[in-house]
Image: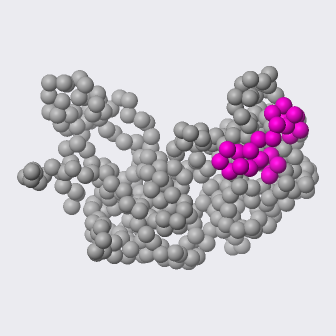
Amino acid sequence: MTNTNNALRYVTTSVYGVRMPIITEGADIKNIIADTLIEANNSTYQPLTLNNGDIIGVTESFLARAQGNYVSLSSISQEVSKFFPSGDVGIAFPILSRNRFAKILEGLANGVSGKVYVFLSYPSDEVGNAIMDEDALFNSEINPYSDVMTKQEFYDRFGEYKHPITGCNYIKMYEDISPKIEVILLNNPKDILKYTNQVIVSSIHLRQRHKNILEKQGASVITLADICNKENETHGWSEYGLLGSNYSNQDMLKLFPRNAKSFCMELQELLKQKTGKHIEVMVYGDGGFKCPKTKIWEFADPVVSPGYTSGLEGMPNEIKIKAVADNNKNSPADAIKQAIEEKNKGSNAYNLGTTPRQITDLLGSLCDLTSGSGEKGTPVILIKGYFDNYLSSNPID
């Protein structure tokens, strides 16, 4: 049967991974992205047509690599020694990660003249990586809000534990980085001051809370965001400091990209010049989603998107279609049409229950799930029809 209703649009939101060349430091990725999208439009296999209102996502690592935004472990050590020229230093609440934190810890430890205490939260870090069996904790007499344990006390009570995904014993792994390092397990930041009053807060999303608590107790505190966050001529830098950094090689870290917002605005303008279309642009890192099986919230970057164009600001303003339909069972389609039209005039009668997330967090998660971090070779994502609704027909010309 042939459908003669040509105005009805069956496919709306769709997402495409766009293959890009392998780039090196100094690459003009704005032109590379624009030209590749134009070539994709002319491809004989699944050509990608660009429309006004489309969205381009660029992975943070693609931008950072083009910027040459790297820092050596020795540079990290030098900066740490300026903050804390003498004495013991505490490293508070880092995540458990080989490529996200192990090399940071090595750089930090080499910059400290005294002992380095690494304070790990339990039963997991702030993004859900387990350091012990959670049921074992609940079945013990340990109070996680008040009890402090040395490595040996922890082993005596719970045994040595390996991460269920990586197979790593992170307590051992972190202590093996340097003979200066001693791991302590605790959850109350105030207990850190029993060991040292010089602290590098290494949590990501809770860093400001931890810093405030410690500073109110008289500690001298910096965060990972304070290290390598100033423009200089000797190494890379980022507004986020070491937050969002990642393993590059044995002696180097790749930092989160800098000036991401200006990059997005410039790419948007270039795409307008080359294609005639108004396209929104964002840089994305880790998506803000949680694995239901492992309970890991794989969000090790400080934000989902460090930069984006103005059309992506705010939260979605959408009616809740199922609520409209359930309350208008005699003519749900007409009611939905009317509700959308009223919403466009400013009414929000049916948007209750819509998950309150920023547009960039939703889109960044979609981009991250599409591109992955492996061998797909698609550091640029094209999203079409994201701002469509039930009444949308043809794409915006």
The image quadrant of residue 348 is top left
85 lies left or right of 170 = right
Q: Residue at x 38, y 65 (%)?
A: 268
323 lies left or right of 83 = left
Q: Which residues are magenta?
A: 151-174
Residue 338 appears in the figure: no
In this view, 70 is above or below 91: below
Residue 326 appears in the figure: yes
How many labels, in total?
0
381 lies left or right of 5 = right
In this view, 254 is above or below 348: below
Q: Residue at x 59, y 52 (%)?
A: 301
- Residue 309 rendering spot, x and y as whole percentages: 41, 57
229 lies left or right of 348 = right
**Residue 381 vs residue 73, the one in the foreground:** 381
Q: Residue at x 84, y 44 (%)?
A: 183
- Residue 78 rendering spot, x and y as whole percentages: 81, 64
**Residue 125 vs residue 28, the one in the foreground:** 125
